[in-house]
Image: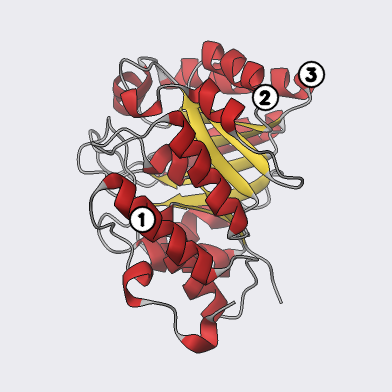
Amino acid sequence: MRHIEVVEVGPRDGLQNEKTVLRPQIRAELCERLVSAGVRRIEAASFVNEDLVPQMAGAEEVFSSLVREPGVLYCGLVLNERGYERALGAGVDEVRYALPVTESFARRNQNTTVEEALDLALHLVERARLDGVRISVTLSVAFGCPFEGTVPQERVVELAREVAAAGPDELVLADTIGVAAPAQVRALLGEVLGLGPVVGCHFHNTRNTGYANALAAVEAGVSVLDSSIGGVGGCPFAPGATGNIATEDLAYLLQRMGYETGLDLERLISCAGWLSVHLGRELPGQLYRAGAFARAAG
């Protein structure tokens, strides 16, 4: 049975767009609940400007509050070298750097240019090797940009090739605003798979294609997918970039398709319900409301 690794991004990408700001200790508890549901890789926080993204304030406190579990990787998102240094100081197991593929998104999201962001990505990969920490590089808005529209596939492939040559542990293609369709996913992966690093995908369900895209990616050969408990999330700097695909919904789909995830559906459902209470609203995910089909449990 083929294993698909599900990387949980709820504590970071999920919460960064929420109106309700959760305390670092609650975000650490969310991580612990996810671990109890079988998650083994969690994007626990982002080391960014807290004035711009107050939902991510106290990243160091999140990491200091974690009860570390053997075999679990706790990741931190960074957007610049200062963030990288903060992440290292906090004790992350993996740095995740976001490289925007369009000039407009680079300027709005990170106040940089694509060329500068690429140079930084290559530099951080080199630093991570020396520092003995894992590093993933995510190509943001790889399937479409909220400001420039369609992104030429050849441009994404060009950037992916340059990043891959530096040797990161993983290269992630992100549909940051949820505009991709399965044919586009298969076409881009056909060019990127095989460049060297492990390739993962990050999908949003903004236009109700996220799960179809995730399945297309798996069938194309991807073995790593990002998702967010309850389907919460979105980018604060990308208009209309609503929720990620929900971890429990993705796990249900993959298990029903015969893939192994190592995730406990009932515990994921319980975790999504717990998060719904803390956020004071119903979450976009559907499984935590409908319940798992008995034959798919476990």
SS of the residue at dot 2? loop
Residue 155 is at least partly visible in this image: no
Residue nearer the viewer, 212 or 235: 235
Q: Does the CB distance between marks 1 and 3 fall below 8 Å? A: no
Residue 212 is at least partly visible in this image: yes
Q: CA distance from mark 2 to mark 1?
A: 27 Å
The disc at residue 91 is 2
Q: Nearer the viewer, mark 2 or mark 1?
A: 2
Q: Nearer the viewer, mark 1 or mark 3?
A: 1
SS of the residue at dot 3? helix
What residue is rendered at 62% in x and 21% in y?
A: 90
Q: CA distance from mark 2 to mark 3?
A: 15 Å
Which is nearer the N-term, disc 2 or disc 1?
2
Q: Does the CB distance between marks 2 and 1 fall below 8 Å? A: no
Residue with the mark numbered 1: 231
What residue is rendered at 36% in x and 34% in y?
A: 22
Give x and y (percent) for residue 210.
37, 61
Q: Amino acid at mark 2?
A: Gly
SS of the residue at dot 1? helix
205 is higher (above) or lower (below) than 266: above
